[in-house]
Image: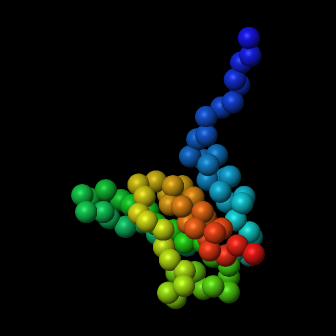
Amino acid sequence: MSHNYATPMTPEKRLARVLSRIPADWVIRVERHPGHDGDMLWRAVVAPTDADAGQDGSVRWCADHPAMVDALEAAWRHARQHFAQ
């Protein structure tokens, strides 16, 4: 009988995984703001340095997420598709 020794992905491991995939010369912006019900929400944008992340209309913030790592993952998914070479 085989055993699965994989450990669950903690938020710290997920964050480390996402950050390791983003090129070192890219810009990462993360913001936290209050939601409609008082809970704090996170949004992020990831883009190449020359795209001026979050400042112009070509780079968009991801949707709001309750966890920072979820927002960063969403931003990275979008950037990967938008800036694919």
Name above or below for residue 70 compared with residue 7. below
Asked if residue 80 lies left or right of residue 59, the reply is right
What is the x, y in percent for residue 23?
A: 74, 69
Camera sees residue 65? yes
Quarter occupied by the N terminus:
top right
Asked if residue 62 lies left or right of residue 7, the reply is left
Camera sees residue 72? no
Q: Nearer the viewer, residue 39 or 45?
A: 45
Residue sitting at the far top: 1
The image's colour scheme reads rainbow
What residue lies at 74% left-to-right and 70% top-to-bottom?
24
Q: How many marks?
A: 0
Name above or below for residue 36 compared with residue 60. above
What residue lies at 48% left-to-right and 68% top-to-bottom?
62
Asked if residue 14 lies left or right of residue 36, the reply is right
What is the x, y in percent for residue 64?
A: 41, 63
Residue sitting at the far left: 37
Q: Residue 81: which quarter of the image?
A: bottom right
Q: Residue 47: which quarter of the image?
A: bottom right
What residue lies at 50% left-to-right and 87% top-to-bottom?
57
What is the x, y in percent for residue 59?
A: 54, 80
Quarter occupied by the C terminus:
bottom right
Name above or below for residue 12 compared with residue 25. above
Name above or below for residue 50 compared with residue 25. below
What residue lies at 64% left-to-right and 46% top-to-bottom?
13
